[in-house]
Image: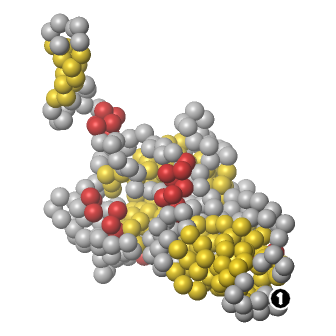
Amino acid sequence: MASIKLKGDTSGEVTISAPAVAGTTTLELPATSSTLATQNALGVRNLIINGDMRIAQRGTSSSSYSSGDTYLTLDRWRSNISTAGTWTMSQDTDVPIGEGFATSMKWDCTTANSSLSANSYLYATQYLEGQNLQQLKKGTANAESLTLSFWVKSNKTGTYIAYLFDVDTPSYRYISKSYTINTADTWEKKTITYAGDTIGALDNDNARSLDLLFWLVAGTDFTSGTLQTSWGTTVNANRAVGQVNLADSTSNYINITGVQLEVGEGASDFEFLPYDVQLARCQRYCVAYGGVGTYEPFGIGVETSGTNASIQLGLPVTMRGSISLTASNVGDIRVSDGSAFAAATAINIDQRGFQQVMFNATVASGLAATKACRLIANNSLAPRIIFTSEL
């Protein structure tokens, strides 16, 4: 029985036995960043969820966005805007060719603002749980660097800002880095490395600890200082220095995909997870029902009075924490018990666990206490019931 020894840079030797081969063959693997990344690819290395923009449970497009801090379409990607024009945010099929991506996040300016207020801003962000970040060793002498890589395309060239924001430290700490879109209407890959932070440990819990932000618009409140390229306490004027005004024309757009944030000083190839795995990771924060079938079921339960039904539903994954419910097009939802087919007038959360929820469906009349029932869409794709446990 012969052996083959694979020798890497720092990982020691792995011996593989093979029959009918005399002697020992040693293959030296070069110490490239790709090799080292492969050695460390046994787990999920991308700290970003839905970085390839595949999951959009809330819908694939949201228009007329001009104010608010909210989730619009793509799962895990939160939007925040103030006096920065009006936008459509969508899941788009424009992607870098030959890189394995099918979708991107697109921002399209529909009403321009070429004269920003001092406090104008628009950014896309993802919040990360502290318990998923303990390997960063933040707040210790061994704090790890982080590398951000992504693909970006825009008609507007110039300087853009991407930054990390620690919300656990009482004084809030952050680090900003710039990147440049060099050629209009062309996909470009960007890589940014952030040094480790030896101050301010991240809480080991299921709450928001670290944010990744892509600035798209920033007024002078955020651009009048000096860009904070090392970790420090928050100074608003230093957060987005140099950021172009993407809101200055209705011709402006930006697409982003392949967002990966990983431990270390080098970027590895984007980590493509199976669709079901990525969906389950997103469902920890959002589970959406509706839009699948014209008589889609939303749960089963019991009628507790002539105007109310208590509905129980098991969720596909354990959600992060306390669950909230939002419902749209409620008038197209029916309580059905075999005889009654009553239109809902309101749907509200009642009791909640991390994987089970009970909610009430209110109708004008027609129900009977103690009768079993189900909640269904009424020959419509419009109704949506969304359970959220976002950071």
- Looking at the rendered structure, the kind of residue marked 1 is Gly
The residue shown at (67%, 74%) is 300
Q: Is residue 220 visible?
A: no
Q: Which quarter of the figure has residue 229?
A: bottom left
Between residue 130 and residue 361, name the one nearer to us: 361
Residue 235 pos. (x, y %): 38, 76
Q: Which quarter of the figure has residue 26?
A: top left
Vertical arrangement, residue 202 with respect to residue 155, above or below = below
Residue 346 pos. (x, y %): 73, 86
The quarter of the image holding the N terminus is top left
The residue shown at (74%, 64%) is 296
Residue 316 pos. (x, y %): 54, 63
Check disc 1 and report the residue beneath it: 366
Between residue 90 and residue 181, name the one nearer to us: 90
The residue shown at (55%, 73%) is 388
- Is 329 on the left-hand or right-hand side of 66? right
Q: Which quarter of the figure has residue 169?
A: bottom left
Dot 1: element: loop
Residue 21 pos. (x, y %): 22, 8
Vertical arrangement, residue 101 with respect to residue 230, above or below = above
Between residue 262 and residue 178, name the one nearer to us: 262
